[in-house]
């Protein structure tokens, strides 16, 4: 029998809600300069992330071509 | 960010979590230009032996041992806040299972596929989540056929249809 695709685990959903609430409190507590610095970090991180994904896709494609 | 990813990989190696994948805005940033937030959404599979009581305490303790600073119910590594989320529904569980291997500045990690990122955004359904799906569509970073199949399986077809109509409307 396959698992119900719409099944929700109430206990885990509650855990997730608490984690999200905790994060919201932290993010709202930051000052404006901290938020600006955070955007700069995010832009830099996205550069690394996209480069990593490009490399991974190239490697997967080369692996497929080799098979 | 590197410290957080190294710590998460260590948790997998030590069996504290079965596996993990990055979702949310950081997950999307592996495919799209940066968005505004920098909190790392990490979705984890807890080991099967975790028992009936679901708790993230062992995960927080293990991240703390790896240098993380636990604050209420999230963890920070330097300037990077990490929120640990569980496989609360079947879509998230599938997204973790089918996440792709990639690397961040030389550190191996796992990220949701674009289609799962979009399906979870549709399921979450806030304005910023729809905006993320629209960006994926505009940047051609998502396979619409695969996303449509996912949406149909998880009861999200109406939301996807409305989002697709909106992108067509904006293109005119």
Image: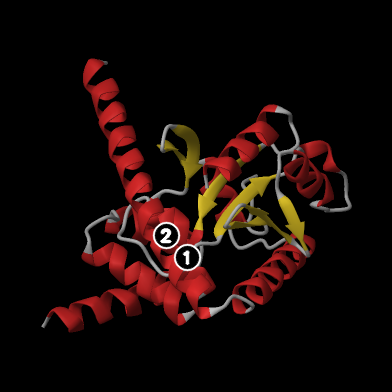
Badge 1 vs badge 2, beta-carbon distance below 8 Å = yes
Residue B127 sits in quarter: bottom left
Q: Which one is in front, A11 or A28?
A: A28
Q: Is residue A32 left or right of residue B149?
A: right
Residue at 74% over, 60% down: A12
Q: Which one is in front, B19 or B57?
A: B57
Which quarter of the rendered picture does the C terminus of chain B lie within? Answer: bottom left
Q: Residues within 10 Å of mark 2 (few under 14, many from 20)?
A: many
In three-dimensional space, the C-alpha distance between marks 1 and 2, rounded to whole angstroms, equals 6 Å
Q: Is residue B34 left or right of residue A30?
A: left
Q: Position of residue A52 (x, y in %)?
A: 35, 39
Up/down of B74 relative to B108, above or below: below
Q: Position of residue B154 (x, y in %)?
A: 51, 62
SS assignment at label 1: helix
Q: Position of residue B83 (x, y in %)?
A: 64, 58
Q: Is residue B140 left or right of residue B125?
A: left
SS assignment at label 2: helix
Residue at 24% over, 16% down: A66
Up/down of B117 relative to A36, above or below: above
What residue did someone put label 2 on? A42
Mark linked to residue A38: 1
Q: How many marks?
A: 2
């Amino acid at each position: 029998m396959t698992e119900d695709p719409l099944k929700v685990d109430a206990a885990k959903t509650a855990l997730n809600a608490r984690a999200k609430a905790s994060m919201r409190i932290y993010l709202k507590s930051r000052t404006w300069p901290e938020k600006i610095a955070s955007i700069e970090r995010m832009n830099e991180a996205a550069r690394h992330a996209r480069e990593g994904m490009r490399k991974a896709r190239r490697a997967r494609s080369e692996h497929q071509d080799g098979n | 960010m590197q410290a957080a990813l190294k710590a998460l990989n260590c948790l997998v190696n030590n069996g504290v979590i079965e596996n993990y994948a990055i979702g949310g805005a950081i997950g999307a940033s592996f495919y799209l230009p940066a968005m505004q937030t920098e909190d790392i959404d990490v979705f984890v599979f807890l080991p099967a032996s975790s028992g009936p009581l679901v708790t993230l305490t062992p995960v927080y303790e293990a991240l703390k041992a790896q240098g993380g600073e636990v604050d209420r119910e999230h963890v920070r590594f330097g300037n990077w806040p990490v929120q640990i989320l569980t496989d609360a529904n079947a879509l998230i569980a599938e997204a973790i299972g089918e996440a792709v291997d990639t690397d961040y500045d030389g550190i191996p990690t796992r990220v949701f596929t674009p289609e799962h990122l979009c399906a979870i955004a549709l399921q979450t359904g806030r304005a910023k989540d729809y905006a993320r799906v629209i960006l994926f569509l505009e940047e051609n970073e998502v396979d619409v056929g695969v996303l449509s199949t996912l949406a149909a399986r998880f009861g999200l077809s109406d939301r996807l249809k409305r989002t697709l109509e909106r992108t067509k409307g904006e293109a005119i």
